[in-house]
Amino acid sequence: MDRVVGTVVRGLRSPIIHRGDNIEEIVVDTVLKAAEVEGISIQDRDIVSITESIVARAQGNYATIDHIAKDVTAKFGDDTIGVIFPILSRNRFSVNLRGIAKGAKKIVLMLSYPSDEVGNHLVDIDSLDEKGVNPWTDVLTEAEFREHFGYKKHTFTGVDYIEYYKSIVEEYGVECEVIFSNNAKSILDYTKSVLTCDIHTRFRTKRILKANGAEKVYSLDNILAESIDGSGHNELYGLLGSNKATEDSIKLFPRDCQPVVDKIQAILREKTGKLIEVMIYGDGAFKDPVGQIWELADPVVSPAYTPGLDGVPSEIKLKYLADNNFADLEGEDLHTAISEYIKNKEVDLVGAMESQGTTPRQLTDLIGSLSDLTSGSGDKGTPIIYIQGYFDNYTH
């Protein structure tokens, strides 16, 4: 009988991970136990994906606001710090801001508008049109912003992030001036010392600042890039990808991830005889149509993966073949024709009409998004995802 099921995705429940746990053994044991209990037949090119959170937890990759403050002070001294383009998130940025404030004398907080980098809105774009405000040219003070738009709360969290972020800074006795602009150069009218907090646009922002007279320029990946007094750190991403752990501590993005996925793959191959692909994933890369939030607040979807997950899909659009190439066929003849076409397709389909409408994104971004949606961010308790049939197609 022909196969009637394609890709299958399972969320696997694992123990709660603690600092010092052997994450590789736990992942392998979880996969093998699930296979035994659920009757899963492990195959070559199955995929195990692991949320970054449990890897960082096992590594004990944590830091406190005091660690952040010490690094900020070391870099900026007594300068007024322009803190620009932070995302609006209690989980992602509020504790970072506490550490920054604790290490500063004065902060000028510059927020992008109408939304932050990942789509959290301070104000809806229609309101800009109504007020005649151009977010690409107009720099607003806090008073001007309030006069135009009043006091708005975030759609999902119910938080007024302008008020919230300002109160965090002032809690440490630090003066905080808030301005609104989408032009990095705007901050240079207030200070030449800048901490840019954007994620995916940070390299461009730093280049613009340095080209226009900034004297000290750092981004979040420069803060806690090295351990401070024994703290956790991340050589590549610093504070990027960090999450709130407690009111005064954060869990950083995991470090040294490639040996983790390589070891898991090796152990699984030893125990099963199968070559299973392994990746660590963070946020997926997708956009919410209601809140307009682009999920990816991590610096990358996947910080490490085995070689078989490198590259992009090379797929044919079945409905295109059915409607065009083989429009005169039906039933078994159509099935045979499409199957033969797929078996003989080119490896590189870029520009081919037969591939239009497929998704030529990085495999790790697609699989990471699939994994993130499966595990969720709440209480499902499935930080390990097992995927089968992802690389199969209509012919097998």
Image: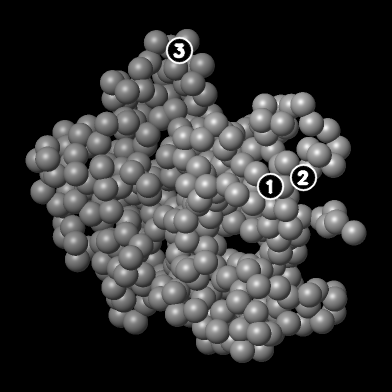
Q: Residue at x 90, y 59 (%)?
A: 1
Q: CA distance from mark 3 to mark 2?
A: 55 Å
From the viewer's perspective, is 5 left or right of 52?
A: right
Q: Find the residue positioned furthest to the right.
A: 1
Q: Residue at x 66, y 89 (%)?
A: 271
Q: Label 2: few (<14), some or many (≥20) within 10 Å?
A: some
| Above or below for 372 versus 346 | below
Amino acid under disc 2: Thr
Dot 1 and dot 2 residues touching (CB under 8 Å): yes
The numbered disc on residue 340 is 1
Q: Nearer the viewer, mark 3 or mark 2?
A: 2
- The location of residue 135, given as percent across then percent down, is 36, 23
Q: Is residue 29 visible?
A: yes
Can you identify the residue that label 2 sits on? 336
- The location of residue 311, given as percent across then percent down, is 47, 56
Pick the residue in front: 63 or 381: 381
Q: Quadrant of the C terminus?
A: bottom right
Q: Residue at x 73, y 82 (%)?
A: 32
Question: Looking at the rendering, which quadrant does residue 15 occupy?
Answer: bottom right
Q: Is residue 224 visible?
A: no
Give whichever of discs 3 and 1 has the lower sequence position: 3
Give whichever of discs 3 and 2 has the lower sequence position: 3
Can you identify the residue that label 3 sits on? 129
Dot 3 and dot 2 residues touching (CB under 8 Å): no
Pick the residue in front: 268 or 286: 268
